[in-house]
Image (cartoon, rainbow, N blue to C red):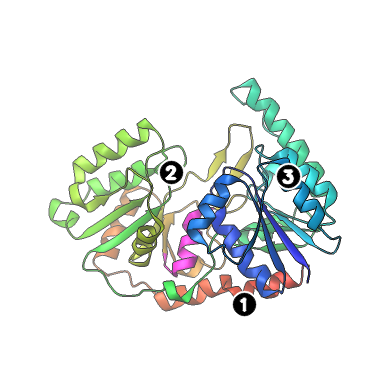
Amino acid sequence: MKKMFIFENSNSPHETSVISSVRLFHSLGFRIVLCLNNRSYSRLSELLDLTNVEVIHINRWSGLKKFIMQYNKKDYTLFNTVALRGLLVICIISLISKNKIFYLRNINSWFQRPLSNVFKFRHKVLGWVLFLAKKWLIRDASSLVVASFNMKLYLQKKTDKPVSIIPFNMFDESNVNTINNDKFTFVVPGTIDLKRKDLSLIRDAMYLFSKDKLNKFKLILLGRPISEEDNTFVKNWKNDVGDSLIYFNEFIHDNEFDMVLKNADVIMGVLNINFQDKYGNKEIYGLTKDTGIEAHAIAYAKPLFVNYDYQVDVCLQSTTIKFRDINDCYRKMEDLINRDIKLDYEKSTLNSCNYALDNLTVLLKGNL
């Protein structure tokens, strides 16, 4: 039986896509071997029963030696994250591996030179190191992986290598819940991060509601503030609107996270779509960079409510409502709360089925 070695040795929270990969490659008959650092192993242990899954711990060179002893030239290697942390190990494993698959989370960073407007010289140097490493790694890749159909369409214009889709979350019918809440519930998943999300737009839209209207809905920020500035912003917002806003100060356990998303009426997002990291890589959310907003809408078969300039995945466009500005956001929130805008959860479920295990397996099989 051919083995699929799945590497995750970064500090990024990408473990859920490891789970999607395990399910997909297992359905194709691969023997799965997870190659994990301590952080990824700890996190995956909470999300997945690893009792019957073979794991190689790659925090020490002994883990690399174990991989070399087990690897056969017919086996495949999936690099779930390519980042500066663990880059040397990835380069060594890539030299050994014949059938290499790279997961591209920030497409432009693989094909475009970092911009020169980087604040720190250290980050400028590291950005170039990572770019040159990615350019070298992708040259001999047997195939590539992205998180969405939008990203696949974009990447296919950049390369002639086969491109498959392994989403952050796959659609799971057990997550579907279409029971109406007493109070209409908007859920904004992800960290409270003003640099990436224009949360002031949602805040200002909420300020247009009367006190009576505020009592008719809930807006849940399903994440915690990442900076003191973010914390001050959301505390002041909470003081202004009271119980209609819910947010978290601590890590949200998976059971609670799951329950909130299941009970959401819509998944809401207000992303600053043009993103530049500290190394000078410029990306576009929804097109060259994946986002949890779509992933959660897919996994829980929920309609989307997002800012107008966000490029929603082609599979989700028919169940997406968009707003242009504060007043438009307010009006559409009011229509949703009053049920004047009818949400088609059946269509949301059909759209999410594009990201179901069986459909993604067919696409993946043709690229191996």
User: Which label is found at residue 368?
Assistant: none
* 299 magenta-colored: yes
Q: Secondary structure at mark 3?
A: helix
- Most frequent secondary structure within the magenta stretch: helix
Is there any visible trace of residue 21 in the rendered image?
yes
Q: Residues within 10 Å of mark 1 (few under 14, many from 20)?
A: few
Question: How many numbered dots are placed on residues in this image?
Answer: 3
Expressed as whole percent of the image width and height from the top left, the position of residue 224 reads: 37, 44
Inter-mark Cα distance, 2 to 3: 42 Å
What's the magenta region? 291-303
Task: Give the residue type that dot 2 points to.
Answer: Lys
Q: In front here: 313 or 208?
A: 313
Dot 2: what SS? loop
Left or right of 155? Residue 207 is left
Q: Nearer the viewer, mark 1 or mark 2?
A: 1
Of label 1 and label 2, which has the lower sequence position? 2
- Lower position in the chain sequence, tag 1 or tag 3: 3
Give the vertical position of 153 relative to 121 (above or below): below
Q: Specify the label residue 62 is tagged with.
A: 3
Dot 2 crowding, Cα within 10 Å, few <14, some 14–19, many 20+: some
Tell me, for residue 358, which label it has, or none: 1
Which residue type does callout 1 highlight? Asp
Residue 111 shows in this picture: no
Q: Residue at x 48, y 57 (%)?
A: 46
At 63% across and 75% down in the image, what residue appears? Answer: 359
Which residue is identified by label 2?
197
Marks 1/3: CA–CA distance: 37 Å
Quadrant containing the N terminus is bottom right
Cβ–Cβ below 8 Å for labels 1 and 3?
A: no
Q: Residue furthest left?
A: 212
